[in-house]
Amino acid sequence: MISSTFERMREAMQLSAEKPDPALLPTPRQLRRSTIAAVIGAAFIGVCVYMPAEYGIDPTGVGGVLGLTEMGEIKQQLAREAAEDELIHGGGEQSSRLVDDIFGLFAGAAHAQEAWVDTVTFSLAPGAATEIKLVMAAGDVAEYEWVATGGRINFDLHAHGDGQSIDYDRGRGATEGQGSIEAPFPGEHGWFWRNRDDANVTVTLQLRGAYSDVVRSE
């Protein structure tokens, strides 16, 4: 008898533990309210926090107040720069060809900008001489480069004009030269060449810069 009484009491306690009190359970209306509140909260976080912080988009202005919009704009800028770097440095053979083409265009433009304007070529027999002069104004700057083939040559780079004269450079038995002339006064600035070798010498002189004329005299 006592055993059966205890058995019934234990079963009653199990049933009480398995079946919650209906009064403690949320009603369907409460569940709907909780769901709507969760959706509104998630939307608020997405619009006011996530979008400004990740994309720099701030339709409400809250992100700007919290300093999140600036952070999102920085992230987007970094992402754009990474994409541009990938376009330039990545992408395999096609991107490499694109980069090569771009650098080729720049190199071609730089070469065109630096091209020589005038080229003067002359030959001197043994013992012969000639002069090549640039007509320049005060302050003009001209660049030059020359090479002698077939032998060596002597030169005297000087200027005269406006009652003044100046020696820039001299050479004996030279085969090449390069540099620039900055005219301190107006006049003719250039070279006196003489072939002291035993064979004919050909000189090719390239010029560019500020000068009005190239004059040759024997």
Image: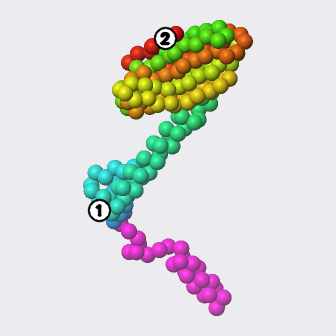
Q: Nearer the viewer, residue 93 or 2?
A: 93
Q: Residue at x 32, y 58 (%)?
A: 63
Along the polypeptide, which appears first: circle 1 or circle 2?
1
Residue at the far front: name it: 163
Q: Secondary structure at mark 2?
A: strand
Would you call the spot at circle 2 few (<14 residues within 10 Å), some (14-19), or many (20 or more)? few
Q: Is residue 198 above or below residue 115?
A: above
Residue at the far right: name it: 198
Residue type highlighted by circle 2: Ser
Q: Nearer the viewer, residue 94 or 13?
A: 94
Which region shows up in magenta?
1-27
Instruction: Please state if 181 lies on the left or on the right of 176 as rendered.
Output: left
Decide whether residue 26 is among the magenta residues.
Answer: yes
Residue 65, label in figure: 1
Decide whether residue 216 is among the magenta residues.
Answer: no
Q: Residue 130 appears at what percent x and percent y?
A: 55, 13
Q: Residue at x 68, y 19 (%)?
A: 152
Q: Which residue is mark 2?
A: 217
Res 36 visible? no
Residue type highlighted by circle 1: Val
Would you call the spot at circle 1 few (<14 residues within 10 Å), some (14-19), or many (20 or more)? few
